[in-house]
Image (cartoon, rainbow, N blue to C red):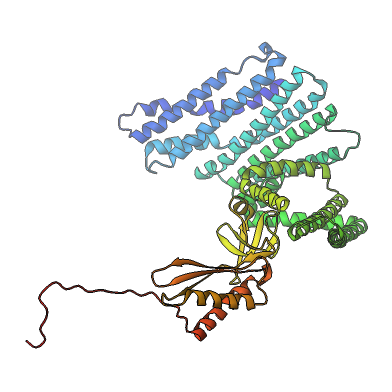
Amino acid sequence: MRAFTLTAVFALSVFWMGGGASYAQESNATTLSEADQELLALEAELDRKIENTKHLDINQRSVRESDYAALLYRRDQHSLDVLSDVIRIIEKIETLPAESATQIAVRSRMTERLGSVDDLIIQRLKELDKRITDADESMGSLSGADSFSRKAYLNSLYQLRNQVLAAMVQVIPAQESLGITGNGFRSQAELILFSHAERLVALLELSAAASLELSREQGLTKSDPDFVRAQTELKLRHETELAQLIDITKALEDLGLDTALYRATIVKQRGVLSTELFQKEILGSIVLDYWESLRSALSAHSANVILNALVILLILFGARWLSRLARRATNAALGRTATSLSKLHRDTLVSTVGAATMGVGILLALGQMGISLGPMLAGLGIAGFIIGFALQDSLANFAAGGMILIYRPFDVDDYVEVAGEIGLVKKMSLVTTTIHTFDNQTLIIPNNKIWGSVIKNVTAQRTLRVDLVFGVSYDSDIEKVERLLWEVVSQHPKVLKDPEPKIRVDSLGDSSVNFTVRPWAARDDIWEVRWDLIRSVKMKFDAEGIVIPFPQRDVHLSYSGEPLNPSA
């Protein structure tokens, strides 16, 4: 059996030896073009490689059993190298003129050489399959370094078989370009490739099922050496099978065959997002596959699925109801407590309690769905650590929101001036604060901008001072103006008696004598007091003949020439 295998493996090399005799005669021609000479040089290089390969055919009796597999593998590589050179020569032939004598001669020799290479390739694939099977079966009896060596040898055989399959695909267009058709080699190649592809798809599905069963094994933990060993072997097997399927799919595509099903399998088994996922035929195949799996699961476990769905919905609705109940209970408890809390603080606590209750319900629903909460929470922790670096500004806003809630510089409906904006505080979260301006615009300001600047809370105190300035002409009676201003201020019902209002002559302006009027009022009455006093003072001044001047200038003219004589 060993002698027969070695002879069959090198039948292709021996076959090549019959066609290299005419090369030397043509190379002596002096009228050859540069392209002809290059083609003949390639053929000479091919003959040299064939000769070298023939010299590797050592007497089998002188080869040790341990070296036999390595020798056989090395000879296979040389045979593939020879076949690759043949393909390159045929591609070079296509670039020469059809009437070239060199082209006709070399084409004839290549046609003769490729005439029966298809049978040799099919035989080579069968032998490789047999060697792979033998190597795989012998793995169980090996250990230590021998086991690792056999694994490496087995992987090299897989790679060699993929290379032979790729060479088979390349031979088909080469034969067709030489006019070698009708031998059914294309059909055989397609059948072999489809058979390997289907086998690999089945192996990948079995590997995925084995990984799932391993994760469900109750007696094994992630720290168990048996679990680690089994998981590593399954991972390596999956990677090897996936790499083989990628090579087979590429070969099928080179033959112009439909590979949407296999490409969809590759995308799913890779488990990563790629542009291939958005191709119409691949996406359709994946969706159809998942739909069939879902329909099968529903038909087989419909009762359990319906029960789990009802339990999950019940958990979610219960969590929502409990979240609302927790909000109301927290709000009521904060309303009865004697602790002084701002409305912003109460609103934040209420919303946090509601969100936490709903979050617990969602976690329970995920657990009911069979999702392991431990790894998910660990993953969320790692993701939060990574996101923290990417969202430093948002975290700064979060921290600033916490500081605002702790120190309470303002509350809801306070009139504030923050970050260069003026308005009433309406809402606050741990990230932003919402302010309504007096012209009914809504401003959403990041908390970091507020805490990092001066906060002016106009309505923080119960009583506020209203600052007014009134200007009268220089001809007005100062004492009378002071008396009139006192009458207007003291008669307003919402001006406070304590603190006492202040009315003073403040400055002598360009056109007027300016009086400063500073009454005090309750926080909610300051605007009404301001507007009423301005209106009342104007009406009082008009009734008493007090002039409120507008800007004016006195112009004095000086003339130093002779006086003008109007009668002259």
Viewer-side residue, 485 vs 293: 485
Name which residue lies at 47% across and 70% down.
514
Q: Is residue 390 left or right of residue 375?
A: left
Name which residue lies at 63% across and 42% down.
389
Q: Is residue 533 left or right of residue 98?
A: right
Please identify the residue farthest to the left as the structure is shown.
568
Would you identify the image quadrant in which residue 229 lies?
A: top right
Viewer-side residue, 230 vs 320: 320
Is 247 above or below relative to 282?
above
Q: Is residue 92 left or right of residue 134?
A: left
Name which residue lies at 49% across and 25% down.
47
Q: Is residue 1 visible?
A: no
Is 276 above or below relative to 329?
above
The quadrant in which the C terminus is found is bottom left
Name which residue lies at 64% across and 65% down.
464
Rendered location of residue 344, percent (x, y): 73, 59
Viewer-side residue, 316 vs 227: 316
Rendered location of residue 32, percent (x, y): 33, 33
Rendered location of residue 507, percent (x, y): 45, 66
Please identify the residue farthest to the top as the structure is shown.
62
Would you identify the image quadrant in which residue 212 lies?
A: top right
Rendered location of residue 222, percent (x, y): 83, 33
The quadrant in which the N terminus is found is top right
